[in-house]
DNA sequence: CATATTTTATTCAGTATTGTAAGTAATATA
DNA sequence: TATATTACTTACAATACTGAATAAAATATG
């Protein structure tokens, strides 16, 4: 069996792909990351992670149609697999389960 | 500035320290991890992460009192710092913010 | 048509950080 | 002195991140 673990940054990227729904390609993900976190991220970091996630079965991709903008290579659009949705649910559920058991945090 | 990032496993360990409250030392954390996740974890993995988290300011530690059991070196007990609580809140908040924007997940 | 420019994909190499396993050392009580 | 219990160290593998470079494909413009 391969490695099926999900790193912290990988998880954020999966969530961003989900948020962008039908428009998740590298440049858009960089922009959405900036918008949602206020931090900058290198596009190669995104590429590296996108391909790793695809290899691990968390993402699928296909080339998009040509747009109405100036030019450019066609976008590679990424989509969450059912497996990714399941993994996101599981890790979120574990964290919530733990958080609810921490007095000072659960009270807040 | 130092490294202030929080890995996925580091985050779980912080949460376990919070859950164990006043009894968070390596062996107890291993057991709690097993109890909460159903998975096994190596005690040295826990040690390595605990010390790293302490260096980064997420945890504080002190040696505990001798117990009423057979023997053994005194336990080193770990506690969340306010900084750790803040970091946990922030990352949880970002994830929830993103999750709420994913149609198929937020509907579930 | 030919060339320039824009936009994006893709690869590569390298460094830093995080995660795991194996093994050693220390200290308490029996 | 033996044994139980835990701390601690070391080494390595996996993941996260960066920067540079190249390639490809689309439209604009002369």
Image (cartoon, coloured by chain):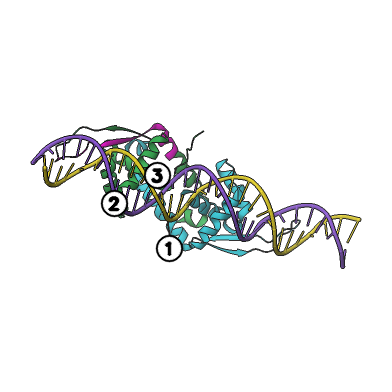
Chain colours: A cyan, B green, C purple, D yellow
Q: Quadrant of the C terminus of chain B?
A: bottom left
The percent coordinates of residue C11 (x first, y second) are 61, 60
Residue closer to the observer: B7 or D18: D18
Which residue position holds label 1? A2
What is the magenta range? B69-88
Q: Label 1 marks which chain's residue?
A: A
State the mark number for residue B10. Answer: 3
Q: Which secondary structure lies at badge 2?
A: helix
Q: Which secondary structure lies at badge 3?
A: helix
Any magenta on residue A100? no
Residue closer to the observer: D15 or A60: D15
Residue B15 appears in the picture as rendered: no
The percent coordinates of residue B66 (x first, y second) are 18, 34
Using the numbered discs, state the Cα–Cα distance from disc 2 to disc 1 in whole angstroms: 22 Å
Image quadrant in which you'd find residue A4: bottom left
State the mark number for residue B34. Answer: 2
Using the numbered discs, state the Cα–Cα distance from disc 1 to disc 3 in whole angstroms: 22 Å
Q: Which secondary structure lies at badge 1?
A: loop
Which residue is found at the position 27% from the left and 36% from the top?
A: B76
Q: Label 3 marks which chain's residue?
A: B
Using the numbered discs, state the Cα–Cα distance from disc 3 to disc 2 in whole angstroms: 16 Å
């Amino acid at each position: 069996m391969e490695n099926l673990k999900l790193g912290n940054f990988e998880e954020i990227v999966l969530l961003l792909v989900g948020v962008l729904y039908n428009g998740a390609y590298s440049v858009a993900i960089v922009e959405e990351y900036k918008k949602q976190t206020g931090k900058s991220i290198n596009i190669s970091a995104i590429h590296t992670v996108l391909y790793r996630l695809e290899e691990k079965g968390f993402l699928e991709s296909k080339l998009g149609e040509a747009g109405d903008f100036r030019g450019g290579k066609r976008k590679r659009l990424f989509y969450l697999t059912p497996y990714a949705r399941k993994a996101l649910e599981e890790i979120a559920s574990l964290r919530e389960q733990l958080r609810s058991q921490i007095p000072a945090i659960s009270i807040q």
